[in-house]
Image (spheres, grey):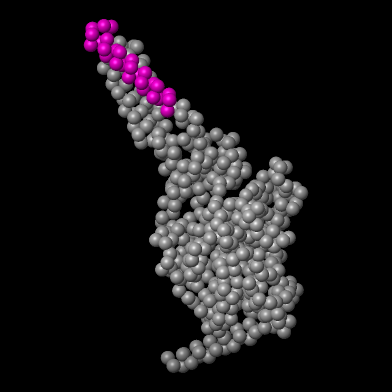
């Protein structure tokens, strides 16, 4: 037993010495710029043993990395469910790290579920590249100007055309909320768009977990990295509020991240960021130089993508409110959540869209789509029953004037179905919608906003599309009440005639 322990300690000591030697500053990387050039170089490639992988626990003690507890005591009652709905694991199970060498640097090891990562990658490609409301680096390209009839980046880059592959390679960033002015390096109230509510909510929860209360995300830059992409060393000093932390979410490929000091003369810390990791710069670290000199292919079975995404979420002083996106007023209930309570969040999102009167609502969650379609089917059935039974009552009164019981019975049934429709269904905002079944309309929507599992041959399921038909609903309401009253009046007349011995 003792000899095994001695041999184990010897091997561990040898490993620590090797790591320390490889992690010491290299002769030509004494400052930030030199370190950046070193890790960027392709031939010869850099020694990545000098890069700290925070997920390796054996390095924590060596490099002064401490695990701290999540500060969830001040979180709202439903924040745990909200976090799970956004694709995050239980916040009490997060691994949160701090660095003695860089006070204010907080590193959270991938708190996302596997499906959560995939959903955020999809959202970054499909949702956060739409213009309007967001802005892209492609706006400067003539072929991408507003008004030339071109679709959004996602559709165009998947058309298989020559310019599609060009635009895929040219996409570098998009800005959300307050748009960063790359010339003046400032944010202004005249240059902003709605900030994504789901990203704002996730940022608030992350900030809450690290002890930053009342965090309101209002600006974000989504950087899209290819294998040959880099992000030069810089500081984020355009914001008005430096007390609020800078939160960065990373998805996709691995990346080498350099974090220096307030000047470039300081030797930077080199970290290996992996898919799902969150980097937070706060306090003394908030205005430090940082950059991404290198993208490294992943070796594990992580979300498949050729890109590395780095969300930089910022907070200003004012508060932003989100608005609806457009395609004839279209909204999507995204299936981005991964928890046992996700269905409730989908329902809440759908209810808010129904009450807002959005023209088109795409429902991706299958269960919610099926339930909504069944509820609409019930309403349609009640409407048809009330009209058909009312018409049947009138026809029966004409064909069998001497049998008023048939006419009266059908009229009573029409009154019951019409009343049931009005009481239980008419005042539901859902009654103003129908499930869109026109293939041309569905295909056009999918061309503009590609949806999961849609194709030319499978446009009717499992995704459901609701279309608002308020005028159609009013007309239906008038029709079935008119038919009902007519049936009641005619059956009453027949009953009166029968009781008085008239034919």
User: Is residue 374 placed above or below 364 in the rendered structure?
Assistant: above
Magenta stretch contains residue 69: no
| Image x and y of residue 426, in percent | 40, 34
Toward which corner of the image does residue 330 lie, by quadrant? top right
Q: Which residues are magenta?
A: 477-503
Residue 99 vs residue 37: left or right?
left
Count of numbered badges drawn on the protein: 0
Q: Give me the residue at 55% from left, 81% from top.
A: 100
* Position of residue 75 measured from the top left corner of the image (x, y, whole percent): 43, 64
Residue found 59% across the figure and 66% down from its top: 241
Instruction: Describe residue 182's horizontal placement relative to residue 59 as left or right.
Output: right
Q: Could you tell me if residue 206 is visible in this image?
A: no
**Location of the C terminus (image quadrant):** top left
Viewer-proximal residue, 370 or 126? 126
Q: Where does residue 28 sit, x and y in percent of width and height?
A: 73, 82
Magenta region, main secondary structure: helix
Residue 72 position in % (x across, y down): 43, 68
Where, quadrant-wise, is the N terminus in this rendering? bottom left
Q: Is residue 487 magenta?
A: yes
Specify the quadrant of the image occupied by residue 394: top left
Q: Which residue appears at 66% of the width and 73% of the height?
A: 289
Residue that protrudes farthest toward the top in the picture: 502
Q: Nearer the viewer, residue 446 or 151?
A: 151
Q: Is residue 400 above or below residue 195?
A: above
Residue 201 seen in this snapshot:
yes
Q: Nearer the viewer, residue 286 or 350?
A: 286
Seen at 71% across and 53% down, the residue is 138
């Amino acid at each position: 037993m003792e000899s095994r322990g001695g041999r184990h300690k010897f091997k561990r000591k040898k490993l620590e010495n090797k790591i320390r030697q490889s992690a010491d500053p290299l002769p030509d990387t004494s400052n930030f710029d030199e370190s950046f050039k070193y890790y960027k170089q392709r031939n010869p490639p850099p020694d990545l043993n000098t890069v700290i992988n925070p997920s390796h626990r054996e390095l924590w003690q060596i490099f002064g990395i401490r695990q701290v507890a999540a500060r969830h005591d001040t979180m709202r009652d439903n924040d745990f469910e909200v976090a799970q709905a956004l694709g995050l694991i239980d916040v009490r199970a997060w691994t949160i790290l701090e660095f003695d060498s860089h006070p204010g640097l907080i590193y959270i090891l991938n708190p996302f579920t596997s499906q959560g990562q995939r959903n955020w990658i999809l959202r970054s490609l499909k949702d956060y590249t739409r213009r309007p409301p967001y802005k892209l680096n492609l706006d400067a390209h003539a072929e991408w100007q507003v008004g030339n009839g071109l679709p959004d980046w996602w559709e165009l880059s998947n058309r298989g055309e020559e310019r599609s592959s060009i635009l895929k390679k040219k996409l570098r960033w998009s800005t959300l909320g307050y748009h960063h002015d790359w010339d003046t390096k400032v944010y202004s109230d005249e240059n902003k768009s709605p900030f994504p509510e789901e990203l704002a909510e996730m940022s608030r929860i992350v900030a809450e977990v690290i002890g930053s209360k009342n965090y309101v995300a209002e600006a974000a830059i989504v950087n899209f990295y290819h294998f040959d992409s880099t992000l030069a060393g810089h500081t984020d000093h355009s914001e008005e509020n430096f007390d609020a932390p800078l939160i960065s979410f990373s998805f996709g490929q691995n990346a080498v991240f350099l974090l220096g000091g307030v000047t470039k003369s300081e030797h930077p810390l080199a970290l290996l960021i992996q898919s799902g990791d969150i980097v937070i710069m706060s306090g003394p670290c908030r205005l430090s130089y940082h950059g991404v000199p290198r993208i490294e292919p992943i070796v594990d079975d992580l979300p498949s993508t050729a890109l590395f995404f780095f969300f930089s979420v910022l907070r200003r002083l004012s508060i932003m409110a989100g608005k609806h996106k457009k395609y004839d007023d279209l909204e999507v209930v995204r299936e981005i959540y991964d928890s046992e309570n996700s269905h409730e969040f989908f329902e809440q999102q759908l209810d808010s869209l129904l009450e807002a009167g959005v023209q088109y609502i795409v429902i991706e969650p299958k269960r919610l789509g099926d339930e909504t379609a069944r509820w609409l089917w019930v309403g349609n059935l009640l409407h048809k029953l009330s009209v058909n039974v009312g018409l049947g009552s009138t026809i029966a009164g004409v064909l069998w004037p001497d049998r008023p019981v048939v006419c009266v019975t059908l009229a009573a049934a029409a009154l019951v179905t019409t009343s049931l429709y009005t009481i239980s269904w008419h005042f539901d905002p859902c009654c103003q919608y129908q499930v869109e079944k026109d293939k041309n309309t569905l295909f056009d929507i999918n061309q503009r906003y590609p949806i999961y599992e849609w194709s030319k041959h499978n446009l009717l399921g499992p995704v459901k599309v609701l279309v608002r038909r308020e005028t159609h609903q009013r007309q239906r309401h008038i029709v079935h009440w008119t038919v009902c009253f007519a049936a009641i009046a005619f059956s009453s007349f027949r009953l009166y005639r029968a009781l008085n011995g008239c034919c």
